[in-house]
Amino acid sequence: MVAIRTPGAMPVHKATIVPRGNALGMVTQLPDKDETSITKKQLMARLDVCMGGRVAEELIFGKDEVTTGALSDLQQATRLATYMVGEVGLSSLVGPVHVDSMSKGGRRNTEALVDKEVVQLLRDSHARVTKLLTKHTTDLHVLSAEMLSKETLTGAEIKELLGLAGGVKDSGKDLGKAKKDAGASKKSSEKVGDAIQGDKENVGAKDNESEKENETLPDAETASEPDVVPAGILEPVEERANAKVGV
């Protein structure tokens, strides 16, 4: 829910409640394009997605009934906030500083500010997600019921369930358009193939006619040979011998 409704968050590829190892479920997010760097907006969105599980437990079960299930999410969120503040300078309190590159004295004076700013980022994220899920509590229950029923949903199915753009219907339209274009391309290819086949048949017919004409024409060597056998060839052998000796 948080990933779908938070600007800057990576698109949801799939969500499941099927247990895997120590995790009782997971949400897979995939970028829709190559990324060489990340904006502050995207990093803040990642913080909010990490807070989604803990906030949902607080809203549904109450603050006294939250579990340890959000451990890995909180670890990831804390590391991310520390990275934002201490490494890439995305904190107005600490400033554009890479803390590890400072002198030992400077690091000691700055570490307290870094810790304070990290906690503040996490608290602000928790507040934003609480406001978001409180506003969309009905959608949260609808999505929970559908997950219990099917166990696994794609990002498009979740959007369709929540009535958001880019759901299954929109994907179906794109698929239908793609199939229509593919069909038109196939028909065009068939027409070209028929034309080529017709040309081949015409060429074959002309070749057959040429062969028939060649069969009716006499061979050059055969035409030059005389049909009459030269005189003397059929004379008896004795007569030819007597002629030679003058008898």
Image: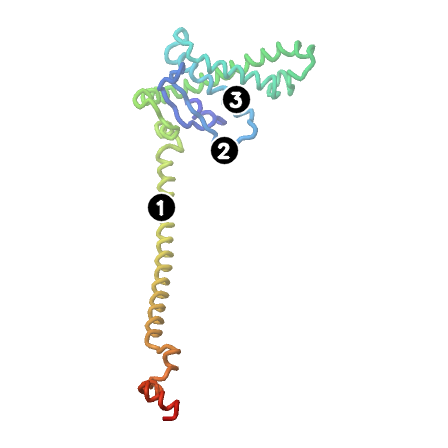
Q: Which mark is residue 44?
A: 3
Q: Which mark is residue 108?
A: none
Q: Is residue 139 left or right of residue 51?
A: left
Q: Which mark is residue 180?
A: 1
Circle 3: residue type? Met
Q: Give the quarter of the figure containing the C terminus.
A: bottom left
Residue 27 x, y percent position in the rendering = 41, 22
Label 2 and label 1: CA atoms lie apart by 26 Å
Question: Where does label 2 land, which residue?
Answer: 33
Sort mark 1 into few (<14), some (14-19) or many (20+) by Cα contacts within 10 Å: few
At mark 1, the secondary structure is: helix
Residue 74 x, y percent position in the rendering = 48, 14
Q: Which tag, 3 or 2, sits closer to the chain's start? A: 2
Please identify, in this view, whether the residue under mark 3 or under mark 2 is nearer the observer.
2
Residue 26 x, y percent position in the rendering = 40, 20
Circle 2: residue type? Lys
Please identify, in this view, whether the residue under mark 3 or under mark 1 is nearer the observer.
1
Label 3 and label 1: CA atoms lie apart by 41 Å
* Residue 79: quarter of image: top right
Circle 1: residue type? Lys
Q: Which tag, 2 or 1, sits closer to the chain's start? A: 2
User: What residue appears at the point 37 percent right and 46 percent down from the top-left corner?
Assistant: 182
User: What residue appears at the point 47 percent right and 27 percent down from the top-left corner?
Assistant: 10
